[in-house]
Image (cartoon, helix red, strand yellow):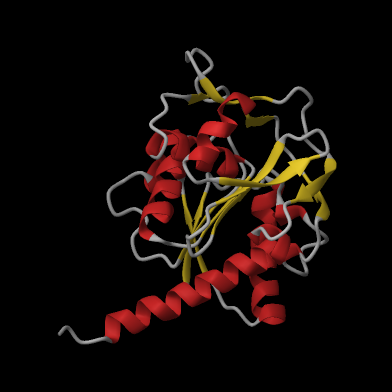
């Protein structure tokens, strides 16, 4: 089961250094053996750059070298029904792709294009870099079912979030905001009807000491496994 880890890999990004530990934990504790491939954002936008993967995970580490690459990763997963997880910067670019590709909005990320006219992602009133915070999860949502609770405390390392002006437009087009901070600001997004399409502003990679995958990462891995089984079964089915 191949997964694309879309990010500009760096030893200075703590979430990146956790990946080998998490892959081992998924195999040893959850019985899910994933074969990860790091795909730089500069390569993710290339034709065929994300073909053949059973899952796509856009990791933290923004600003990315290529906004187009991070957006393309979210678009590929959304339109092809490939399990997708976007964390921190991945969450931000999930929103950017959805706003542009589904809602038809001409919006930008303030960190990437500070001179743009309209921003979907703006600087948070208070940076969350290095902080933990309580998140309230919508009862019945996928994230709430995964976590098994309506409240969770998670770690962040980010300074940008959704411009609430656009929240209703995204919701009207089908995106669900299923996790909010205590002040009501968006922290989790998911897309109903998709095999697995979840983004979080928090970084589940930073949970614990890395010896056990965060429930969200384990749920993503399980979705990847299901997708791989279905894909390989379809490839063996003879044409009518």
| 112 or 175: nearer the viewer | 175
Residue at the image point whose x is 37% and y is 76% from the top:
231
Side of 173 where 52 appears, left or right:
left
Along the horizontal axis of the image, is 92 left or right of 51?
right
The quarter holding residue 211 reads: bottom right
**Image quarter hosting the C terminus:** bottom left
Instruction: Please name the residue shown 80% across and 50% down the image.
Output: 154
Residue 76 drawn at (x, y percent): 38, 52
Residue 136 in view here: yes
In this view of the protein, which residue sits in the foreground, 115 or 12? 115
Q: At 77% from the left edge and 28% from the top edge, which residue is drawn?
A: 127
> Which residue is farthest left?
240
Provide residue 228's location: percent of width, then percent of height.
Answer: 44, 75
* Left or right, residue 20 beside residue 8: right
How many numbered discs?
0
Q: Is residue 85 above or below residue 63?
A: below
- Residue 98, compared with residue 199, is above or below; it is above
Classify 177 as above or below 105: below
**Which of the pair 17/67 is nearer the observer?**
67
In this view, the residue in front, 62 or 192, is: 192
Instruction: Report if residue 63 is visible in the image.
Output: no
Q: Is residue 154 left or right of residue 52?
A: right
Quadrant hosting residue 234 = bottom left
Coordinates of residue 30 in the picture (x, y in percent)? 68, 79
Residue 184 higher or lower than 55, as above or below: above
């Amino acid at each position: 089961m191949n997964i694309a880890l879309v990010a500009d890999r760096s030893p200075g990004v703590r979430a990146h250094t956790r990946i080998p530990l998490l892959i081992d934990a998924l195999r040893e504790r959850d019985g899910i053996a994933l074969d990860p491939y790091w795909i730089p954002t500069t390569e993710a936008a290339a034709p065929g750059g994300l073909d053949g993967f059973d899952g796509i995970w856009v990791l933290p580490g923004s600003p990315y070298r290529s906004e187009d690459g991070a957006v393309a990763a979210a678009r590929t997963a959304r339109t092809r029904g490939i399990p997708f997880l976007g964390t921190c910067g991945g969450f931000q670019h999930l929103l950017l792709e959805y706003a542009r590709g589904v809602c038809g909005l001409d919006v930008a990320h303030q960190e990437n294009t500070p001179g743009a006219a309209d921003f979907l992602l703006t600087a948070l009133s208070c940076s969350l870099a290095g902080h933990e915070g309580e998140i309230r999860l919508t009862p019945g949502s996928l994230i709430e079912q995964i976590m098994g609770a309506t409240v969770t405390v998670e770690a962040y390392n980010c300074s940008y979030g959704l411009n609430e002006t656009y929240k209703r437009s995204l919701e009207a087009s089908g995106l669900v905001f299923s996790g909010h901070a205590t002040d009501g600001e968006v922290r989790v997004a998911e897309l109903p009807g998709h095999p697995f399409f979840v983004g979080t502003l928090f970084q589940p990679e930073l949970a614990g000491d890395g010896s056990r995958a965060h429930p969200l990462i384990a749920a993503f891995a399980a979705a990847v496994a299901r997708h791989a089984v279905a894909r390989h079964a379809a490839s063996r089915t003879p044409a009518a």
